[in-house]
Amino acid sequence: MTRVLVVDDEPQILRALRINLTARHYTVLTATTAATALHTAAREHPDIIILDLGLPDLDGMHVITGLRGWCTAPIIVLTARTDATDTITALDAGADDYITKPFGMGELLARIRAAERRTDTTTPTDPTIVTDDFTIDLAARKVTRDGTTVHLTPTEWAMLAMLARHHGKLVGQRELLTELWGPTYTGHTHYLRVYLAQLRHKLEPDPTHPRHLITEPGQGYRFEI
């Protein structure tokens, strides 16, 4: 069973999510503070984390940063903040998705399912792709650079894997957004810009002049070996 850690200091939200997720056969863990969230994540190793940014003891952005030092579970940010800069900051920090309060339970469940899909995007027959600067082992879900494993979030990995499987070909913005987040996200092109920038920073020798992760303005992206 998929283990979901819900971090929120609002009792009614915790109760609603526990009831709805349990009814759909998820194992639900809860925390109401940042400290408890980090401790629970380290002890229980959840598969997905739903994280409110407005916690009483520490801003949720710091929790994302703390988790991303060692945890690869998808993080869905759940918050009342509506400023676009908060969205970008959360994604930059390592979140995989973002939903604002008030929210519909159906939408949140759809995003959880999308997060599950992003963590299961390879098959045993997937190849290893070698570039001059890094190696992608699609079957092992692993990227190495100069002999060192590169840490990628689930969404960064899913995006890189999709581009790598279609290397040399244009992958459209709509196609990427639908594959990674679902058909309701086709207008969220800023997500793609954020994650491509993060991948370039981690993989490209010169992120400002990428050799492998190429943008085709207004169309999509292309992976070159």
Image (cartoon, helix red, strand yellow):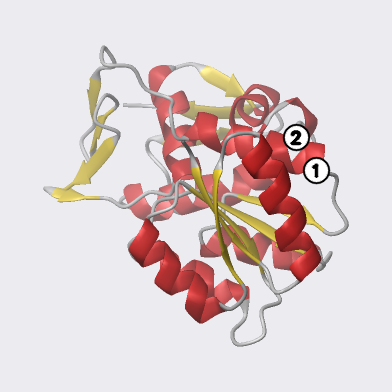
Tell which of 127 and 103 is nearer to you.
103
What is the spatial separation of the Cα atoms under label 1 and label 2, in whole angstroms?
17 Å
| Amino acid type of the residue that numbered disc 2 sits on in the rendered structure | Tyr
Residue of label 2? 185
Report the residue that reaches farthest toward the left: 147
Q: Position of residue 15 (x, y in %)?
A: 73, 59
At which x and y percent is residue 25? Answer: 58, 35
Which residue lies at the image location 38% right of the left edge and 58% below the top edge? 44
Residue 86 visible in image: yes
User: First in sequence: mark 1 or mark 2?
Assistant: 1
Please tell me how crowded label 2 is: few (under 14), some (14-19), or many (20+) other residues with Cα within 10 Å.
Answer: some
The answer to whether any part of residue 66 appears in the image is no
Q: Amino acid at mark 1?
A: Met
Above or below: residue 168 compared with residue 64: above
What numbered label is drawn on residue 105? 1
* Quadrant of the frame with the C terminus: top left
Q: Considering only vertical position in the picture, is 13 above or below 63?
A: above
Task: Give the quadrant of residue 111.
Answer: top right
The residue that appears at 51% across and 59% down in the rendered structure is 94
Q: Which residue sits furthest top? A: 125
Q: Residue at x 71, y 52 (%)?
A: 17
In the rendered structure, the answer to whether residue 110 lies left or right of residue 204 reads right
Q: Are marks 1 and 2 in contact (CB under 8 Å)?
A: no
Image position of 29 with respect to 136: above or below: below
Residue 126 location, x and y as percent? 29, 16
